[in-house]
Amino acid sequence: MKLYNYILSPSCYKVRLMAALIGVRLELRPVDFHPGGEHRGPELMALNPAGSIPILEDGDLVLTESSAILVYLAAKAAPEWLGSGKAEEAARVQQWLSFSGRLTASLGGARLHEMLLRPGDIGAFQAQGIAALRELEAGLFEQGLRGQRFLAADRPTVADIACFPYVALAPDGGVSLDPYPAIRLWSRAIRALDGFIEMPGIHRLHELKPEPHIEPGEA
Amino acid sequence: MLSDPTGSWTPVALSVDLPPGTVVPARTPAGPIALWRSASGRPSASADRCPHRGMRLSHGFVRGETLSCIYHGWSYGAAGNCLRIPAHPGLSPPETIRVATHPVEEAGGVIWVGVGEPATQPPQLAGLVPLRSLQAQAGMAALEAAAGAKADENGLLETTQNSQEIRLLLAFQERDETLIHVLLDGDSSLLERIAVSRAVEALRRKAEAIEAEGSSR
């Protein structure tokens, strides 16, 4: 499977993270998103007329929506990440997969504006981002009351991976994560998963690694 | 915020939101703090600034009984003294390297941080248990206007919203920002808890609309 990838793209990171968590190997094809704008060039436009990344190629199959790519990887390698299939759980997975698009539009818009100087109304991006974070916080709080630590179940699903990156990178767009205790606990639970990988701006939990010991004179 | 001549207590967070081995950002009238709980369960509060390079300690991590800075790993104990500087493994850090600390009291599921040296204990919330905390972009006055009720000297406010009884513990953050802790009876059902949480979100929307209208005048 070939992933057209950009290291700083939260949507590409979703795919890399999902693959790492379920042990799928990806062939990474780097895309010069910035400053080259390669995703809008003829080769990639031929693959994805929307001019966006990630793009996943697997034989004849070309997928261009990150949520669809997550579902594809999970269905092939680890179907438990799709949820149990119970009506309410299946609906919650879809609810948060759709919601993740609003995170991309709001928090992602703010981040592109602040980091890559993309045009747009930064105040509106941030206000919509805060509204989305409040929805997520309330959703996670209510899940906690039901004894479930993740968005759709008491185990992580593709919905958590779809929402996590843009939330974790909200401060890049000038949106603080300080006011959200349930999001903080959820983010810790995701970063504590076996196989978790980092991207620039999203670090692992240092306390889970053994404390490094350097002898005097070694440093 | 309970004031007395020598200091005051602020309810900064709920116990449930600070599990062992974690650190979170919080605010007191004296400024931002790093609130952390050691592996053995002891809560501590320090200034949210590493004295080395100024990084927020709430971005750091807790290992055992120490809080470490994410930047260069300087580690601090509950008393605020620096215990370890990883780049100088042979050095015992001098006593002068310290972060300012604050007294912490935890009772009934609420974590209170003292500013100054409060002479009394934090107020008791008899019979009530905390549900969740949420932040409002609205000052105390706007929240009181939305609730149609006044908070008492401890920050406790009681009101009825959409025929839902609501009890809140309010903590001042900024002139136009308030931390709301939602309280309820310990024997409330799951549906009651969800209903109260949603009613407080409705109250927050109302208060924020009042605040926005007030500041645009």
Image: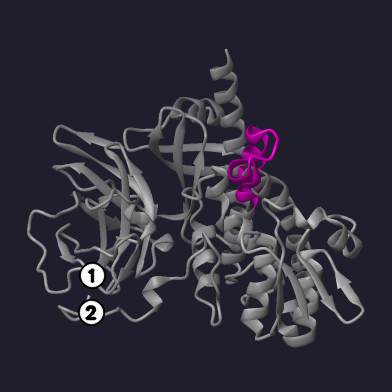
Q: In which quarter of the image is residue A47?
A: bottom right
Magenta stretch encompasses residue B12: no
* 10 Å crowding of disc 2: few (<14), some (14-19), many (20+): few
Pinpoint residue A33: horizontal percent, then vertical percent.
71, 56
Q: Which of A211 and B160 is in front in this view?
A: A211
* Residue placed most toward the observer, B66 or B120: B66
Residue A117 is inside the magenta segment: yes
The picture places residue B32, in percent across and down from the top left corner, at 33, 43
Q: What stretch is highlighted in magenta?
A: A111-135
Q: In this view, does B90 lie to the left or right of B35?
A: left
In the shown orientation, is residue B195 left or right of residue A214? Answer: right
Dots 2, 1 in contact, CB < 8 A: yes
Locate the N terminus of chain B and report the quarter of the image it occupies: top left
Report, in whole angstroms, how far the alpha carbon at label 2 lies from the one at label 1.
8 Å
Q: Is mark 2 on a helix, strand or loop?
A: loop
On the picture, is B97 further left or further right than B114?
left
Q: Position of residue A88 (x, y in %)?
A: 77, 70
Using the image, determine if residue A154 lies above or below residue A13.
Answer: below
Determine whether B89 is above or below B59 in the image. below
Classify 10 Å Cα crowding around label 1: few (below 14), some (14-19), many (20 and above): some
Residue B86's disc is: 1
Residue A151 vs residue B207, the one in the foreground: A151
Chain of the residue under label 2: A
Q: Name the residue under label 2.
A: A214
Q: Residue B175: x percent and y percent?
A: 41, 27
Q: Nearer the viewer, residue B192 or B131?
A: B131
The residue that appears at 40% across and 32% down in the rendered structure is B174
Identify which amino acid the numbered label 2 is placed on. Answer: Ile
Say whether residue A153 is visible: no
Q: For the point 35% across and 61% down, which residue is it?
A: B70
- The residue shown at (57%, 37%) is B204
